[in-house]
Image: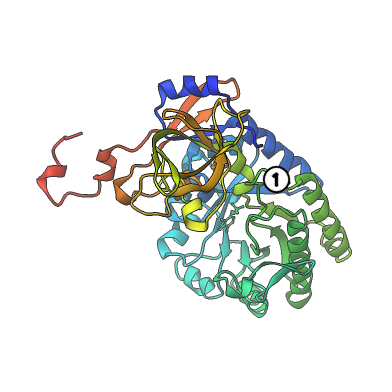
Amino acid sequence: MKKTFVNLAQLQEITQQYPTPFHLYDEKGIRENARRLQRAFQWNKGFKEYFAVKATPNPAILNILKEEGCGADCSSFTELMLAQAVGFTGDEIMFSSNVTPVEDFAYANKLNAMINFDDITHIDFFNQIADMPETISLRYNPGGEFKISNAIMDNPGEAKYGLTREQLTEGIKKLQNLGVKHFGLHAFLASNTTTNEYYPELAKILFKTAVELKQETGAHISFINLSGGVGIPYRPEQEPADIMAIGEGVRQAYQEVLTPAGMDDVAIYTELGRFMLGPYGCLVTTALHEKHIHKDYIGLDACAANLMRPAMYGAYHYITVMGKENLPCDHKYDITGGLCENNDKFAVDRMLPKIDLGDLLVIHDTGAHGFAMGYNYNGKLRSAEVLLKEDGSTELIRRAETPADYFATLNCTEYFKKSLF
Ligand SMILES: *Cc1c(COP(=O)(O)O)cnc(C)c1O
């Protein structure tokens, strides 16, 4: 059984103020987890986590992480705006984009963000609009299959990201000619990994590559960016990743590979999203309808537009029927939203306690890639986001959309110009 970070009485009070559905975030959990990560990597002098803004693009959340010493990893113009709005500057911003528009590079350059090139052609593309910064990072794609002890973790050979091994050497030489002095190396080879081996294996690959690149080009490698990919246990039977063991695994790889090569000034960076926020957010929703046809359905006031992962990836999200945590799970339900799409199901054939209309349901682990992937299909509006603060009070950190927001980009008829809302 997975536990919620709020109880029924708290939620009843919160829902008096903010109608469901909304995403709720746990400030205490976010801060404690961020501190664990910092401890796991405190052996590395330059360590910095650049939170992947795309996972939870809310300034209040970014501000909490900033207070915990994190930077921001951005990949678009508006994500850079968010980072700037929160007060991230210079090398507190990592710009790990791909298929990058010229305006985005120009803006990242204006902010003195750390630029992480996704392709060798981006060097010339960037050089036409700005002088090269002193430090540039390159994203590596080793190709083939990425395996950990013979288990296939992912398929970099099919991934659109990064430079090939040969292109790294060529790219560094080219950048050296353009005056670049320091280099970073980045790779993202597998997503949502709960094995403690992922970061250490990835680190080994990047460390060895960094040593080779230094030998081939004389380049000074100033940081290695392990990017995102540390996962969370969405299922109740899954073990969480042990971040202390992960940090220790990376330290051992560092000592094995970088230290003997005289490269022990290399800083370790991460760009975690899911690990930083996933478990510390949930979607709070109310049972609106029940329906008994060929199967038994519970219809919620939330839908896939509020949380896309189940519809998109068939992803599992644990569900708690609030106040019924200790009742037997003796009813089999499909838990659905109201989109006119049959994949709008938060759970299929899920065993749960008997649900009554008006019951509050908590859909777990929506803190990362939850609200962020929301959309407006079927004219559904994005929900509010509420922060549960450390003192138990709440703050509305994003209001719910209204029809006026939905129609804000239309002015093709008089209808939308009148104040109808
Ligand atoms: C999505 C992404 C991340 C974060 O990934 P998680 O799976 O949330 O840890 C980090 N870096 C880049 C470049 C990304 O695209």
Q: Is residue 5 above or below residue 133?
A: above
At 62% across and 52% down in the image, what residue appears? 271
Residue 373 spot, x, y in % from top left: 45, 50
Element at badge 1?
Answer: loop
Q: Is residue 145 left or right of residue 360?
A: right
Whether residue 109 is visible here, answered yes or no, is no
Q: Quadrant of the C terminus?
A: top left
Nearest the eye: 25 or 2: 2
User: Can you name the residue that lies furthest to the left here?
Assistant: 414
Question: Depth check: 238 or 332 in front?
Answer: 332
Residue assigned mark 1: 237
Asked if disc 1 is less than 8 Å from ligand 1, the answer is: no
Q: Residues within 10 Å of mark 1 (few under 14, many from 20)?
A: few
Q: Quadrant of ligand 1?
A: bottom right
Residue drawn at x 72%, y 59% as measured from the top left: 222
Q: Nearer the viewer, residue 243 or 216?
A: 243
Residue 75: x and y in percent read: 50, 57
Q: Quadrant of the N terminus?
A: top right
In this picture, residue 421 sits left or right of residue 330: left
Rendering coords of residue 353 (x, y %):
55, 33
Front-lying residue, 95 or 11: 11
Q: Measuring 44% from the left and 59% from the top, which residue is drawn there?
A: 104
Q: Tell me what residue is drawn at x 74 percent, y 73 percent.
A: 213
At which x and y percent is residue 184?
67, 62
Snapshot quadrant of residue 20: top left
> Eyeballing the image, is 99 above or below 407?
below
Q: Which amino acid type is marked by label 1?
A: Glu
Q: How is the image coloured?
A: rainbow
Residue 162 visible in the shown view: yes
Number of callouts: 1
